[in-house]
Amino acid sequence: MQKNGVETLLMGGQACVFYGAAEFSRDLDLLALVNAQNLIRLRQAVDELEAQVIAVPPFDEQFLQAGHAVHFRCGRADVAGLRIDVMARLRGVDGFEQLWRRRTVIDVGEQIVHLLGLEDLVRAKKTQRDKDWPMIRRLAEQNYLEHRGEPTPERVRFWMRELRTPELLIEAAARWPRQAQDEAVRRSAVAGAVGGRADLVVECLELEERQERERDRLYWQPLRRELERLRHELRL
């Protein structure tokens, strides 16, 4: 992708590894800028990887713009079998240009890796999938444990918004009471943490998760119907 100049951001399980919340992933999940030039570069990259689309929808701008993922399977010997999932839009997350400005850049020696920013990655993982919620908790928890000795306003705001470990949220609320009070009006789990009510924090976190799962289900309903229509057309 980088060799062909494709503007992409790494997300999914492999991005979580870079943030210290290890998750084994056999897939490469990428968010791509969708414009004419970047799609040409993306086609060049998948052609060099000898990658084929393995499911609906087809590799077409309209489906990426609608929020679908396009799924590829690589055929080239050195990456044979690798699955690459490409998306251009994520529920509840800003557009690519804003995400690119907030990206995390990591030098791994042989190349530079552009990752979805941590807060954006956490938002993107608020889905219906059971496996995403423990990962959200680990991402926020790891960031807090690693940086609580060096708090910045941005970090404290992130912790108040996204920590899902009750004891750590209560600890953070006690350490930064003003920021906790500000966030408590928007997040009931923080209100519970301000009062030191672990039972209430747990209850509020469970409600948060149920609500986000339902929002994600409703978001995907029309997209799933479109995928079913495409599958039906292929069988005809």
Image (cartoon, rainbow, N blue to C red):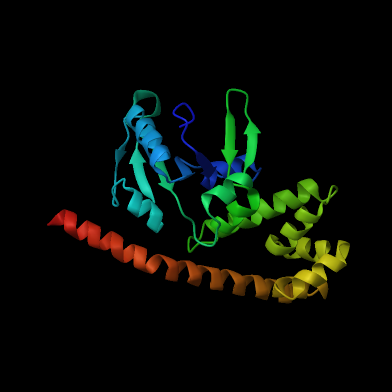
**Up-down: is 227 above or below 148?**
below
In the picture, residue 230 is in which quadrant? bottom left
**Residue 18 placed where, x, y %?**
62, 39
Q: Is residue 222 left or right of residue 158?
A: left
Quarter the C terminus occupies: bottom left
| Residue 17, quarter of the rendered image | top right
Q: Who's the residue at 50% across and 40% down the image? A: 8
Q: Residue at x 86, y 68 (%)?
A: 178
Locate residue 152, reporting x and y percent.
82, 51
Is residue 182 visible in the rendered image? The answer is yes
Pick the front one: 81 or 236 = 236
Q: Residue at x 38, y 58 (%)?
A: 66
The image quarter in which residue 81 lies: top left
Q: Is residue 174 above or below residue 113?
A: below
Looking at this view, name the residue that lies furthest to the left: 236
Q: Is residue 91 shown left or right of residue 236? A: right
Percent coordinates x, y for residue 215 in the rendering: 49, 70
Count of all numbered marks drawn on residues in the image: 0
Which image quarter holds the N terminus?
Answer: top left
Q: Report the residue at 52% width, 49% height from top.
A: 96
